[in-house]
Image (cartoon, rainbow, N blue to C red):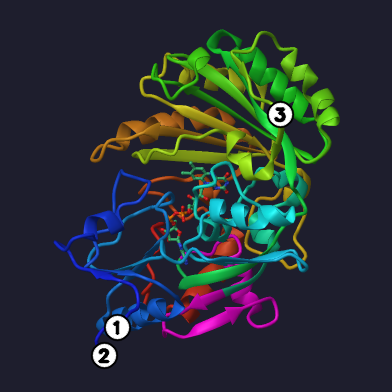
C-alpha cells in the first residue's frame, strides 16, 4: 500500500496541531479522525482519498466547521482551510474559488472590480459548502440561490480521480452538487458567477422587547409589498450585557429587522420608511455601504460556540403562529432561543437555467430556531425547537439543509429528490466512503 505523501501537513491524535485542526466554529462536537490531512491542493485531496479508500477508512471534509453535523470517528479528515485561493475573471464576471475559501476571501477578491458573490449573512462561512447546500444570500430575492450560479465544480470521487463536473460533462452530478451536494466526494473548487454589485443599501432596525409583536407584524405585511431588489430578514434574540454589544442593546431582548437592497439609496429609504415608522428604535444602522462591508447587515458574532437549530420553510406566515412564537421563544422561554426569519420568493422561486437539486422553491419564508447547546443533552433543546415550529406546520413545505445546525439531523431532501440522490450515491460512492453528517 502506498504511503501518504502530501504537500500539506498530516496530523495524528496526540500530535501538535491535531486538536486545533479538527476544531471548527461549531463547538458542540468535533470529528475524531485517525488522521487529518491539511490539504494544500487538489493533489493532496486525491492522495488522502486514495489512502482512505485503500484501507476502508471513511472520509470527512471540513472547511470552517460552521455546518458540522454528525461527527466522524476513526477515518481521515480532509481539512481544506489552507485552500483559500480565489481567482476573479472580471470580463467573464466569474470567480474560481478553492474549497476552503470563505465568502470574505471571495468578497475581497471581487470588490476591486465592482463585483460581488452570492454570499450570505456571515462572511466567515465557507463559500463552497454554503453553495453545496443551496445558499441563500443577502441579495437572494434578486439573484436566486448561490447554487443557481455555479458553472463548474471539480470533484475528487471515491476512486481518487479528479473530475470536472459541468452541465455538459456530468449533468446528473452537476444537478446534485448544486443544492444537495454533500457526500458525493470532495469538491476542490468551483467556478461561480459574480454579480455587478459594488454597493448596497442595508443594515438593521432594532426594537425593544415590547415592540416585538408590532414590528414582526409590520414586517410580515411589508414583505408582501416589496420588489425583489429588497431581501430582508428578522432575528429575535437576547443580547448579553457586555461591551462588544452596542450600548443601547446591552442586556435586552430585541428584534432586529435586517435589510439588503440592490438599488439606489433614496428608493431604499422610501421603501423602508414604513418600518422606521413602527416607533422608536434602539438602534438604526441602515446606510449605503460597499458590498465589502455587507457583514454589517446581520452583524453576527464571529465567536465559535456550541449550537443546535431546526428550521421550516413555509409558504405563508400567519399572525397567530407568529404570536405563539413571540411568546414561547421570547424572554419567557425555558432555554435561550434565537429566532431567524428570512423573506424568500423573487428569484429564489424561479428555476435556474440549468436545473439543480435546490428544493422547495415555493417557500415564501424560512424560519430557524437556534439555541446555545452543551455537549451531552440535546433532548430539551430539540423538544423546545419542535414545539416552537409546530404552529407553522400547516404552512410548512420542507426544511432547508443549510439552516440545520449540529448533529442528529435527517437529510432534508424531499421525497421527489431522494431516489435520484440515492441512485447517484450508489453509482459514485458504492462503498459509502464519504461521510456527510446527515442521516439518510
Ligand atoms: C453564523 C452563520 C451564518 C450563516 N449564514 C448563512 C446564510 O446566510 N445563507 C446560507 O445559505 N447558509 C448560511 N449558513 C449555513 C452555512 O452555509 C452552512 O452551515 C455551511 O455548510 C457552512 O459551511 P462551512 O464550510 O463553513 O462548514 P463546514 O462545517 O466546514 O462544512 C459543512 C459540511 O459541508 C461539507 N463540505 C465542506 N467542504 C466540502 C467540500 N470541499 N466538498 C464536499 N463537501 C464539503 C462537509 O460535509 C461538511 O461537514 C450560516 C451558518 C452560520 C453558522
- Which disc is residue 2 wearing? 2
Q: Residue at x 66, y 8 (%)?
A: 280
Q: Along the horizontal axis of the image, is 47 left or right of 190?
A: left
- Separation (CA) of disc 1 from disc 2: 9 Å
Label 2 crowd (10 A; few <14 / some 14-19 / many >=20): few
Q: Which residues are magenta?
A: 154-182
Query: On the rendered structure, is 412 left or right of 431?
Result: right
| Residue that appears at 41% across and 19% down | 333
Q: CA distance from mark 1 to mark 3?
A: 51 Å
**Residue behind mark 3:** 287
Relative placement, left or right, of 44 versus 191 is left
- The answer to which of marks 3 and 2 sits earlier in the sequence is 2
Residue 55: x and y in percent read: 25, 82
Residue 390 place in picture, x, y as percent: 51, 31
Q: Are marks 1 and 2 in contact (CB under 8 Å)?
A: yes
Identify the residue under disc 1.
Answer: 5
Q: Is residue 36 visible?
A: yes
Instruction: Give the image quarter of residue 60.
Output: bottom left
Q: Is residue 13 above or below residue 107?
A: below
- Along the horizontal axis of the image, is 403 left or right of 112? left
Amino acid at each position: 500500500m502506498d504511503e501518504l505523501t502530501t504537500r500539506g501537513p498530516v496530523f495524528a491524535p496526540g500530535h501538535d496541531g491535531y486538536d486545533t485542526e479538527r476544531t471548527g466554529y461549531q463547538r458542540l462536537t468535533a470529528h475524531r479522525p485517525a488522521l487529518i490531512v491539511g490539504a494544500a491542493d487538489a493533489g493532496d485531496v486525491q492522495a488522502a482519498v486514495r489512502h482512505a479508500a485503500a484501507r476502508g477508512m471513511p472520509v470527512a471534509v471540513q472547511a470552517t466547521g460552521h455546518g458540522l453535523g454528525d461527527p466522524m470517528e476513526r477515518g481521515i479528515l480532509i481539512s481544506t482551510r489552507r485552500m483559500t485561493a480565489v481567482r476573479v475573471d472580471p470580463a467573464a464576471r466569474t470567480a474560481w474559488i478553492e474549497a476552503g475559501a470563505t465568502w470574505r476571501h471571495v468578497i475581497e477578491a471581487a470588490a476591486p472590480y465592482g463585483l460581488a458573490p452570492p454570499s450570505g449573512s456571515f462572511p466567515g462561512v465557507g463559500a463552497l459548502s454554503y453553495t453545496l447546500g443551496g445558499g441563500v444570500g443577502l441579495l437572494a430575492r434578486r439573484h436566486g440561490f448561490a447554487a443557481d450560479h455555479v458553472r463548474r465544480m471539480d470533484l475528487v470521487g471515491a476512486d481518487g480521480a479528479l473530475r470536472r463536473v459541468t452541465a455538459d460533462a456530468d449533468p446528473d452530478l452537476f444537478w446534485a452538487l448544486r443544492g444537495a451536494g454533500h457526500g458525493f466526494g470532495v469538491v476542490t473548487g468551483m467556478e461561480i458567477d459574480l454579480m455587478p454589485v459594488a454597493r448596497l443599501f442595508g443594515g438593521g432596525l432594532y426594537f425593544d422587547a415590547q415592540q416585538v409583536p408590532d414590528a414582526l407584524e409590520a414586517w410580515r405585511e411589508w414583505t408582501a409589498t416589496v420588489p425583489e431588489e429588497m431581501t430582508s430578514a428578522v432575528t429575535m434574540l437576547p443580547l448579553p450585557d457586555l461591551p462588544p454589544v452596542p450600548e443601547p442593546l446591552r442586556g435586552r431582548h430585541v428584534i432586529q429587522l435586517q435589510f439588503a437592497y440592490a438599488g439606489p439609496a433614496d428608493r431604499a429609504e422610501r421603501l423602508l420608511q414604513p418600518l422606521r415608522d413602527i416607533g422608536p428604535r434602539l438602534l438604526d444602522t441602515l446606510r449605503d455601504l460597499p458590498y465589502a462591508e455587507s457583514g454589517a447587515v446581520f452583524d453576527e458574532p464571529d465567536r465559535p460556540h456550541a449550537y443546535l437549530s431546526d428550521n421550516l420553510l413555509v409558504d405563508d406566515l400567519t399572525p397567530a403562529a407568529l404570536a405563539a412564537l413571540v411568546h414561547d421563544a421570547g424572554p419567557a422561554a425555558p432555554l435561550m432561543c434565537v429566532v431567524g426569519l428570512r423573506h424568500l420568493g423573487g428569484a429564489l422561486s424561479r428555476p435556474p437555467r440549468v436545473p439543480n437539486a435546490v428544493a422547495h422553491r415555493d417557500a415564501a419564508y424560512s424560519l430557524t430556531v437556534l439555541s446555545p447547546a452543551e455537549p451531552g443533552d440535546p433532548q430539551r433543546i430539540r423538544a423546545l425547537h419542535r414545539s416552537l415550529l409546530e404552529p407553522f406546520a400547516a404552512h410548512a413545505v420542507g426544511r432547508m439543509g443549510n439552516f440545520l445546525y449540529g448533529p442528529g439531523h435527517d437529510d432534508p431532501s424531499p421525497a421527489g429528490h431522494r431516489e435520484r440522490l440515492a441512485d447517484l450515491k450508489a453509482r459514485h460512492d458504492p462503498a459509502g466512503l464519504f461521510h456527510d453528517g446527515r442521516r439518510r
